[in-house]
Image: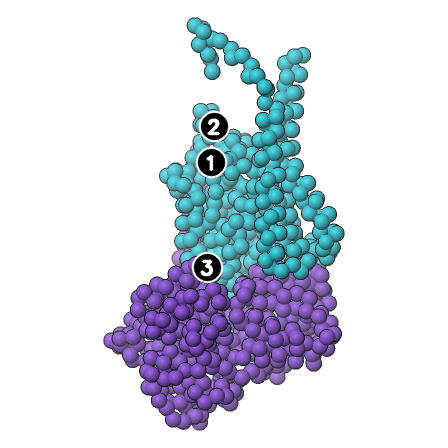
Chain colours: A purple, B cyan
Amino acid sequence: MTRKRQALAVLLVAAAALVALVAASGGTAGHASVSGPSGYVGSGKPMVGSGGGFGEKYTAPAPTLAHTLFHANLLPAKGPARNIALAALGRSTKTVNYTLALKCWKDNGCSTGTGGKLTVAYVEGFGENTYRQMSKMEFILQALTYPQIGKIIYRSAHSDLTQAIADFKSVIAQHVNAIVTYPDFGDAMIPVFQQATKAGIPVSTYAWGYVTGPGSNYLTVVGEDTCKLGKTFAYVMNTQVKSGNIAFLGGFPGNPLSLGWQKCEQPALNPSIHVVANDPTNWDPSKVQGIVAGILAKYPDLKGLSYEDALFMSQGGYAAYKAANIPYQGVFTYRTDESAMGCLADKLKDPKLKIFYYTAGNSQIRVALTADMMKLAGGKIPPEIVFPIQLQNQATRDMCTKGYPPTASPTSLIPLSLLHQMYP
Amino acid sequence: MGRSAGASGRRLVASAFLVARFLPVWLATCALVVVAAIAAPAALGSTSWSYVLPNATVLAIAALGQMLVVMHAGIDLSTPGVISVGGNLVAGVGAGADHNLPVAILTALGVGVLVGLVNGILVGVLRLNPLIVTLAVGQIVLAWSSKYSRDVVTNQPQVPGGLSSWATEKQIGISNVFWAGAAITIVVALVLRYTTAGRRFQAVGANPRAAWIAGLHVRRNVVLAYTAAGTLYAVAAVLLAGISGSIDPAFGSAYLLAPIAAVVIAGASLSGGLASSTSTWLAALALTLLTQMLVTMGLSTAMQYIVFGAAIVAGMVVSGDRVAAVLGRGLRPVKPPPRPVGVGGQSTQ
């Protein structure tokens, strides 16, 4: 009898959990806006740039540029690269179907319903964080501005190199017309890049996903000049820290983004500034916590830290400081601008916490897709499309932006109403 | 007199087996502390312990769950899935408000029970292979967790402040998480050792056929093992959520192999049978301390992986299971005693 009661109790707990689970997953779907501009347009004027070609207009609203680049003039300097950037970001004004975009994002691909003959793919080694998910939506929104695109494919290899290569081969075999990727595994992707290029499929990377041989092994790399980013980080450290111990954190071992800024920050630092740690975090907040805890154990007087991801430092990094009972102070330079970090800084209100950041650059993926499309239209694409750097100071420009999910970058071009449907 | 001497001899041999099985992890942990004191003294400083103890506790709780399953010759690969969904539910249901915390924790625990129960039924009742089936269930849970995380948690990744504050608070200079984990470990150890249900549970794990002949409910105990394991993973998820303060899509991903490594290094046999809660706890502590020591030493990532992997291999080589097997061979009589002969010259065995 007692055993039956015990079994009944377990079943009751399980049933209660199931009910709670269903209730928890219910969420509020809300009603989607049917359609709207594919990106942030603000007041929409004045327009920057002129001319056009290869199916594009080389012009974009100044508010759009200022929203995603901090300033409308922070465009690539060179002519063709500047034109591609303007054409891509200018597509924010085109109207797209938000319901379709949301469905495509949730289903990891879709038919656009235009009857277009082209298929485009966004293939990446890892896609399981908000940054990548937002990039996926930016890619979809950009693709929906092209009526000639009839199908959108998305693949994430969940951090598995073998799977990443298999995914790439799979989309080549499906005869896609254009590929955009972030090469999480760096030069290990060269053989499949070459295979796609040989098959006549343009491959572009964003977020400075630099793999050896842009222009030959693949079409182009889009992003900020990461070497300049590293030098700018060094400038901040030299002027703010002046002397003492600092640390570098990176993403996956060998990823081109981390290598790009680290190799240029290190030699540009004052001799009195010592880089006491340089660890990959796999862009995983739990790992960030463990590594920062290890660094603080040996160097509790750490004066600064450079890393790509502001969000993960606001999560794992802050948790490590808190657990170690060490004030969250020092000079922090980040490549991204997720709202959570700014809101944490606002909450702490500590003048000794100094944060300098760049944009997460989700919208760069739009430029990568447009570069592919212009190539298909017969355009000549430069091997590098490089955006200039301008770090922002949290003290003068708050990255905590009202209305944005804490894990999202406010410099993304995803319309806010759509973002709220993605993350209700 | 002769019988008494024989009984005490058998007890001595049994004690020797037990000591041989669980002693290596204690010695290895002591050795690790000595190495850390020489090579990376900062890893033994108070700042380091403030990270090591709570995180070792989370690993220990997950490993305790795995231990219960391993005692029945099973294995559970749904651990990351349960921890992921548990953490996400704490943040999602909690919605950043302390008054939601009890419901959030109960929901996370309930889901742990549910997943464990499903695993237990599939393995214990339907006799499916635990390696494959728990991996499959774990993947389903992980997929749901990923969806829930995207739909609900991304917009509110912070766990309720009450939980994170509790996790960072200390009693006698040590994190609350540690004390909670220590209490759970003691309860599990006492239940296994001193209650009828616990002894039955161990008996079924040691020899299911003999237990069945003795009238014990083998299937029920296997289902219980997986259910209890799922519950402990959910407890680990709640504690980890408190430590982290916020949830991310990769939450819990580090708990696939580490709990299994802790259980095996602690001296449990993957073929079932005896295991020790305290040794499992110690193994979890040793693994976490080793990780922290390697980071503190400033080794390159490649070297950290090499040293960590080598340490686990070394731990396996000197694991209690192997030592016990060697000791067993050494203590086995060279000549088997003559078999008692029954009626008609037939062996009674």
The amino acid on which the numbered mark 3 sits, given as a three-letter code, is Asp
Q: Which residue is mark 3?
A: A160
Disc 1 secondary structure class: helix
Q: Which image quarter: residue A33?
A: bottom left
Q: Which residue is mark 2?
A: B211
Chain letter of mark 1 equals B
Residue positioned most to the left: A115
Q: Which image quarter: residue B326?
A: top right
- Using the rendered image of the protein, determine whether residue B239 is visible from the camera's viewpoint: yes
The amino acid on which the numbered mark 1 sits, given as a three-letter code, is Asn
Disc 3 secondary structure class: loop
Same chain shared by disc 3 and disc 1: no
Q: Nearer the viewer, residue A407 or A148?
A: A148
Q: Quick one: label 2, few (<14), some, or many (20+) residues within 10 Å? A: some
Q: Position of residue A310 (x, y in %)?
A: 57, 72
Disc 2 secondary structure class: helix
Q: For the residues marked 2 and 1, what is the alpha-carbon distance in whole angstroms? A: 11 Å
Q: Nearer the viewer, residue B279 or B211?
A: B279
Residue at left offset 49%, top offset 78%: A223
The amino acid on which the numbered mark 2 sits, given as a three-letter code, is Ala
Q: Nearer the viewer, residue A256 or B218?
A: A256
Comparing labels 3 and 1, the label whose residue is closer to the camera? 3
Q: For the residues marked 3 and 1, what is the alpha-carbon distance in whole angstroms? A: 37 Å
Q: Which image quarter: residue B209?
A: top left
Q: Which residue is mark 1?
A: B221
Q: Nearer the viewer, residue A284 or A44?
A: A284
